[in-house]
Amino acid sequence: MFGETLKLLKALEGLYKPKNEEVLKLAEVAKLNKLYLAFLRRVDVLHRDLLLEEARYKRYLKNAIEVSGALKNLNYAFYKFRKPVDHVSVDLDILISVDDAPKAARILRQLGFKAVVVEPYTVTLEKGNFIVDLYTQPSFAWIVYINGGKLLRYAEDFELSGMWVRGISREAEVAVTAAHSIYKEHMVLLIDCLVAQKWMNKKTREIAAELKVEKALEKLLNICESVNRGLVEAPIRLKPPILLATFLEKAVKDSAFRATLPNATRYLMRRSIGADVLSRLTRKSY
């Protein structure tokens, strides 16, 4: 019989109807894999949860459209945003050119946002419960893992709830999803697999090669193949030896990644290293 991940996947595809006793468990799996709204729309129960999640989704879209309108004259793009299924994110990630970053932050402050974290490649702003992360370079621990300028070349306009906004192309989103899950989060969610499976094509491989994330893409595709065969349950956390080998390969091929690796030391000195490591080792999702 199918494992929980495959049951969830098939339920989303309309090929499996969860039994009553399975719904709550699969709902938890859906939450961990950022597929809660999509799952609730497929099952004919948990109506209150669906109403609450739909309201959250509506607010998220409204806020995203407002931010897009404010930044429309700048060189920006939503990224890690477009998915094959509707989802509610905890924040809005925006890639912005280095030249336009100060202006973007100023515009958002005029909208009522407050800068709460300022780091070398990122500014985090908040307004109420809505968070916007402005990135000049996709990074983690102050280590650059994708060239932001090159990624912005794949920006395009697309329709969102009847309005036009700007985001990176679907093919580029696959490459970014792979890099983000492997290099930054060290974990693959089922929603990551859906992005790869629905939008992967020849162009994606070209983009991944240009951005020097082809190994991350290969790793993501291999993991998702194991998910589809029922060999693993999502989310899947990368094992340390695999993660180390992936990082070493990235450092050899990517000069920007290699050059910014020392930044991690300064980053960790500003945080509780033990707590951060423990969180990474024990978390179930990201």
Image: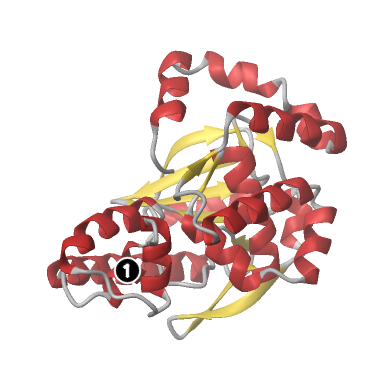
Q: Position of residue 155 (x, y in %)?
A: 69, 68
Q: As rendered, which of 52 and 163 lies closer to the eye?
A: 52
Residue 99 visible, this angle: no
Q: Residue furthest bottom?
A: 162
Amino acid at pointer 1: Phe
Q: Is residue 227 above or below residue 165?
A: above
Other residues around mark 1 within 10 Å, as few (<14) / some (14–19) / many (≥20): many
Q: Is residue 225 above or below residue 85?
A: above
Residue under the image location 48 percent in, 15 percent down = 273
Q: Is residue 3 above or below residue 266?
A: below
Q: As rendered, which of 5 and 150 lies closer to the eye?
A: 5
- Say which quarter of the image contains residue 3: bottom left
Numbered disc 1: secondary structure = helix
Residue under the image location 50 percent in, 44 percent down = 236
> Is 181 placed left or right of 234 in the picture?
right
Residue under the image location 44 percent in, 66 percent down = 64
Q: Which residue is mark 1?
A: 39
Residue under the image location 41 percent in, 57 percent down = 5
> Is 172 placed left or right of 58 in the picture?
right
